[in-house]
Image: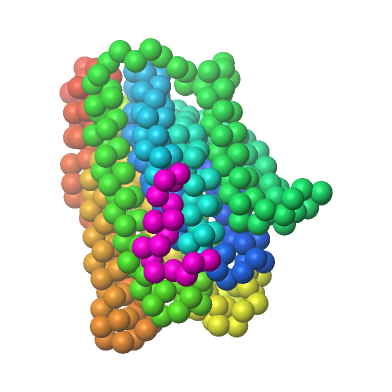
Amino acid sequence: MDRTRVRRVWKRVVRLAWPVMAEQTFRTAMRTTDIVITALFSPAAVVAIGLADLYARFPLRVGLGLGGGAIALSSQDTGAEAVGSRDEAVTQALLLGVLAGLPFVIAGVFFGDVAIAVFGAGDEVIRLGSVYLAIILATAPARHVALIGARALQGTGDTRTPMYVNIAANSLNIAGSAILGLGLLGAPRLEIVGVGIATAAANVFTAGLLLFAVYGTWTDANFARPQDFTIATQLLRVSTPRMAEGFGAELAQFPFNALLLGFGEAVNAGFQIGRRVYQQVTGPFSRGYNVAASVLVGQSLGDGDPETARFDGWAVTGLGIVTVGTVGITLVGLAEPIVSLFTDDPETARFAVDFTRVYGLAAMGLVSFSALSGSLQGASETRIPFFARVSGMFVFFLGASWVLGRTLEFGPIGAYIGVFLAYLWMAAVTAWGFEFTGWADRAASLMTERGTAPADQWPESGRW
């Protein structure tokens, strides 16, 4: 192994990833704050916001899917210096995001109570969850724009502008949740409604600032009149498996949460807290490595150098294993004092500690999947991560948990095992896909199709 080369890649990864990590830290801190504040109201409020967030993650998955297409095309065309194609890809992705958000607005307003009721939750959970869900989904188009705009800029190598915007917006969200939720500084105490309003306002604020950043002159990306239907087609081809991957993962969460509720509300509340602890501590790393891998691989492919793209992808994965693996092990040891910050209910805390430790042990698998799926995304290959996640979620996360927990009557222990196995499987499948499939050829084919590939250079260099 060329250690000098690895260190050089790691330094570049850190330059690209730290703004994403900082941005994600504030995002997860915002969600963590919501859980902490909601826990002050009642256990029912914690369950309500957790169940509502299952639906709120559907627009998140659409935004991430279209953002995945945007970062793939943006990074490749940046590497190929095809500015016009890149700007048109950014513009078309944003327009698709706005349109895709409208059905969620309708669903939140008219079907919120039905959506929460399917879990078999109590009347109070249904009442609180449906109101919160309607508020959040009302800003789904803005949430899409925020996600797509950030990833489009990241594809150009600009990870700082999205960081500045998201830190400002999430800070506003944190303050708003505390003020409106708890009734501070003379504001009315709106409890879970106030938490929802703060999040919705932050979504709109983020979208507006990112649109202004793209329109302005201080970012490389810009708006362009949509003219090339090939770009829209490719955005959908790359984004659709990514969206389906997210949808599949979220669909598995529904029966999984119903399974946990069958063991008791304390088990489900413990899962919500344990997962939030894990996401707060390790999520920023995983997201940062995912974005950095997409940018490095995409730009190397745009430059016609798949060998460097492959090396960079593995180097990012190695860095993720070293850093997130260490954090995960630390999380296992410190689970009890960390969970005590979220709840003082003994039964809820017991299950939250267990889930926190499970996620800590699975940290290396999850960060490997994140980095490798980002690498494949940079190459426009989103089908392999789709298969890895969906099969992992349904076969292990849900299937193994259900068989072990309900059929074999292991109870919550069955869910612990299923969660752990799911992330190991996802990492193994993406590692196989990155090592043995023809993702570089796919990227070359798509770039040639939209006229941005440096085809005259590749035969001479022999790199394709």
Give above or below for 391 relative to 452: below
Instruction: Specify whether residue 424 is in view.
Output: no
Q: Nearer the viewer, residue 98 or 416?
A: 98
Give above or below for 340 relative to 131: below
Residue 115 covered by magenta stretch = yes
Specify whether 46 is left or right of 453: right
- At x 44%, y 69%, the residue is 121
Relative image position of residue 178 (x, y in whole percent): 70, 53
Give the farthest residue toward the bottom.
409
Q: State which region is magenta.
A: 108-124
Relative image position of residue 112 (x, y in whole percent): 43, 52
Q: How many marks?
A: 0
Residue 416 covered by magenta stretch = no
Specify whether 379 is left or right of 140: left
Q: Nearer the viewer, residue 165 or 83?
A: 165
Find residue 183 and report its image quarter. Answer: bottom right
- At x 61%, y 69%, the residue is 42
Relative image position of residue 35 (x, y in whole percent): 59, 61
Task: Name the quadrant of the C terminus.
Answer: top left
- At x 32%, y 41%, the residue is 377
Q: Main secondary structure of the magenta part?
A: helix
Relative image position of residue 275 (x, y in whole percent): 49, 65
Instruction: Specify whether residue 250 is in view.
Output: yes
- At x 65%, y 77%, the residue is 344
Q: How is the image coloured?
A: rainbow
Q: Nearer the viewer, residue 159 or 33?
A: 33
